[in-house]
Image (tube, rainbow, N blue to C red):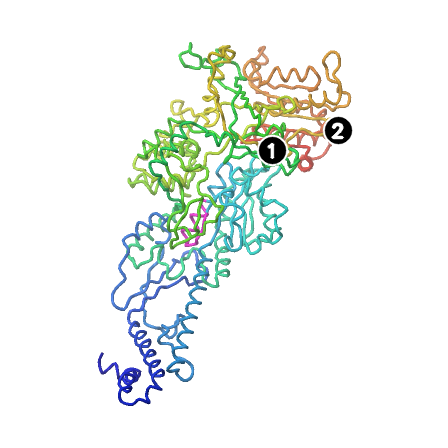
Amino acid sequence: MKFQDFKRSPGLLVAFAAVILPFTVPLVFLLFPVLALGALYWLASYNASGSNADVEINANAIPRGPASENEQPVCIAAKASTQPTPSSSSSANSHESNGAAAGNAKTIVADTTPNPTSEQPPPPATVAASGPKAVGGAAILAKLKAQKAARAAAEAEAKDAQAQQKGLTILYASQLGTAAEIAKNIHAEAESKGIKSRLAAMNDFGFGNISAENTPMVVMVASSTGDGDAPDNSSKFYNEVKRRSNATDRLAGVSFTCLGLGDSNYTRYMAVPRVFKNRFLELGATIFYDCAEADEVDGLEEIVDAWISKLWSAVAVVIESGTKDRGVNDGTLAEGESSRTGGTQVEAEKQAGDVDEILHTLGVPALPKVRVSLQWADAATAASVLAAEEIGPTSDQLAYRDVSYSGSGIDADSDDFHGLYSPDQPFWAPVTDAKLLTATFPFSTPSSGGTPIKDPIDPDLDRRVLHMEVDISGSGMEQFYKPGDSIGILPENDPRMVDQIITRLGYDPDAVFSVRAPEDNITSAHVNGHTSGAGSNNITIGAEEKLLSHLKWPCTVRHAFLHGCDMTTPPRKSLLRVLAEHCTEITEKQRLMFLCSRQGRDSYATEILAARPSLLELLNGFPSCTPPLDALLDALPALPPRMYSITCSPMTCPNKIQVAFTIVKYTSTKYDDSMTRSSTGNGTAPPAASHITQREGVATTWLDRLCTPLIESSYQKQSTDTSNALRPLRVPIFLRKGGAFKTPSDLSRPWIMIGPGTGVAPFRGFLQERRARIQKESNMSKDGAISTSSTGECWLYFGCRRPDLDYLYESDLKSFQQDGTLTRLEVAFSRAPRQNQDEKKDSKKVYVQHFMAQHRMELYNLFIEQKGTVFVCGDGATMAKDVHATLVNIIATGGKVTEAEAAVQLSALAKEGRYVRDIWS
């Protein structure tokens, strides 16, 4: 302690006197408390002034106005008074793994010298008080109050920061992956703009987690499946949103927007997105950005891109107003956030920013943030999980029963009935029968050496349609299923392809893992039943929220790829972006970047959409690509269930469900050839026959393989040989309601059914129920015919290739016609052999719509004048459109109106429930 210290602070003299005077003047003891308080005040002042020299500014998020399109985000980094801030060695790696958008920021070194014109207040020790300076005990009291106020301000600031960190909640309802892909792109772009966001399927997130506190701003991307049904990954969320028991202010304080995807060929166009929009409004939420609808008929891309491009300015407004001027703006990082890792790495960020600028110019999408980390099981847990997977469905899985509607009195036709079981918890139904509905000569037999026996007349006609029956006894479904409903089946991938992918990437197939949020992305104490810690860049994980639930973890790596991941659908651009990030060879990285960019749209169409490469083909085509397992599992879409129309009635098959499906086979350009054609600029030229490869559907090929023992036993007439009993086969299924696609309650009005190919499957169930109801309401005549005097006409238009090849359910349909259940059966054979020279000259194929046109006046009478119902089932790409156009023409001709007026009338009939379609792409 020096003389300058006494000179600078008189309090030091007071403290000195407090020690000396008690020994000289006893009366001074009365003043000792006051003097001691003065000493404490000096010590506090001394410490405060001594620490001023090394103040470090930690610049928090400071809002700025919306950035212009070309404006670079600016970040402020503190310049310490003694030495530069050391650069973080992890910044570059963090930048690479998070999509590189943060590197666009220019870093400016800011001096910490107080600026009288700055909005930032000077350090507390230098703030001048208004009025006389407090001393002694009053000064200490004032300081304590200031510290309390500072703590309160810090807590308020933390709350504001937490609100900002919640940012966007991006939810998707997706059956085929399109809505999920768009949501992933929005999530990646938000993160690249510095906007905190989280992404999840609606069921995984849970409606219970939607609230003003947890999800102040929600972006939904939603599609429908079937004829207006909720996709499987959103069905639970959808049903909870629709509940009338929800309070009218349940979503008060939540701001949302919704992008709907749909196909106007379907009767209930945009049904699910509109339910979400309307119910959110009814429950008190508000729209922060105009909702949009994109029709696949007109093309999704143009509408979707325009909607997303304007989304960010609306997001900025909500964040800025909701966080008291602490938000982020359109594409601009907040001041003080130079990157996710902070620091002053000017040169590194400049280089990264240059790369980002190039990628942005090319239209390369932002790199999706990895939302998960994998937690590996110990040896004992791994052994237990592996043993359970090898056995098949566990005893718990076999014993599970969905009792949602048991004893509720709900009828299967009620709007309150949504189906039983789910992809998460299916019913494991035994397969009791399987047989081919097509001619047997395409069947591979042992005598043929494993080679399929082709049709000697037309070798190209090797189509196989399989009829499969499952036992649902004791499941509860026997009480609820109706003709027109469907079952979903959870398929599995080709085991050979799975093993090749795992080997190619060097993963351990038997390693067992669970899924959790990354350590730096968790704020909740409980995620999916696992305790988690807290990190810095946090996003709240709700108690109901799940991560990669489709993997059904804990599981082995092999099980995840075999049952959980879609690896054969043409890869989406978000997946290509992830794969590009993990290529070590620069030319491979550049090629994948180009394919997922806007400029590479034509090459993507040729190399990806036309060639349809699997994940294995992509990895083999880019040998340096070695993505880590967590990033790959997060990027791959879920393997979706396949829906099959029920082809029977419970009035005929009370404990069984039967379905029919075509074993899918198709051709595409070989992937290697498509790459060559695209790179040489000859992508539009038709490929030669040697450049074509045959591909197989995932689910139907698996079911065909699974049912082969039953098919062979039936084919070889050995099914009654009990000494050769087959091991019980089981498939995981769930029931889905058909909605308006059901048998009419009124038998007196006409039924007109149009179902070529496997589209006839549900109409077999319709006719079984019609026969049973007529028999119940009236007695059959002595000759076996049904008394139909009080029933309306019932017509069926069926189409197939040839009568000797694929006349599905031929004996059943003819039986319905013979007993009067079916009053008219029209069958169009598109490839029937020509009987004479004149027919051979007329090479036009005959389809169901051609027969309909021939009967236009009769159909007009049944449909319009007698108020009948038209049902259409089958291919939505061509058949449904042609049938729709034919119906419009029939109404125009019969009603003597224009086709535009007829189209409006047909649309009204669809809303009335008299024109119902169950179609698929």
Which residues, given as a range, are shown in magenta?
184-198
Q: Are marks 2 and 1 in contact (CB under 8 Å)?
A: no
**Is residue 836 covered in magenta?**
no
Q: Is residue 43 left or right of residue 368?
A: left
2 or 1: tag closer to the N-terminus? 1
Give coordinates of residue 354: x percent, y percent.
33, 52
Report, in whole angstroms, how far the alpha carbon at label 2 lies from the one at label 1: 28 Å
Q: Position of residue 836 (x, y in %)?
A: 58, 10
Q: For the residue labelled by badge 1, is the local secondary structure a helix, a strand or a loop?
A: loop
Q: Nearer the viewer, residue 376 or 688?
A: 376
Q: Is residue 90 above or below residue 495?
A: below
Q: Is residue 372 above or below residue 452?
A: below
Q: Residues within 10 Å of mark 1 (few under 14, many from 20)?
A: many
Amino acid type of the residue that numbered disc 1 sits on in the rendered structure: Lys
Q: Position of residue 380 (x, y in %)?
A: 35, 35
Q: Helix, strand or loop at disc 2?
A: loop
Q: On the picture, is 665 further left or further right than 745?
A: left
> Residue 363: in sight, yes or no?
no
* Magenta-drawn stretch, dominant element (helix, strand or loop): helix
Q: Where is mark 2, residue-wise? A: 866
| Quadrant of the snapshot with the N terminus | bottom left
Q: Quadrant of residue 658?
A: top right
Measured from the top left, where is residue 437 in percent x and y? 54, 17
Nearer to us in this view, 469 or 513: 513
Q: Nearer the viewer, residue 910 or 662?
A: 662
Residue that label 1 marks: 737
- Residue with the most extreme left position: 2
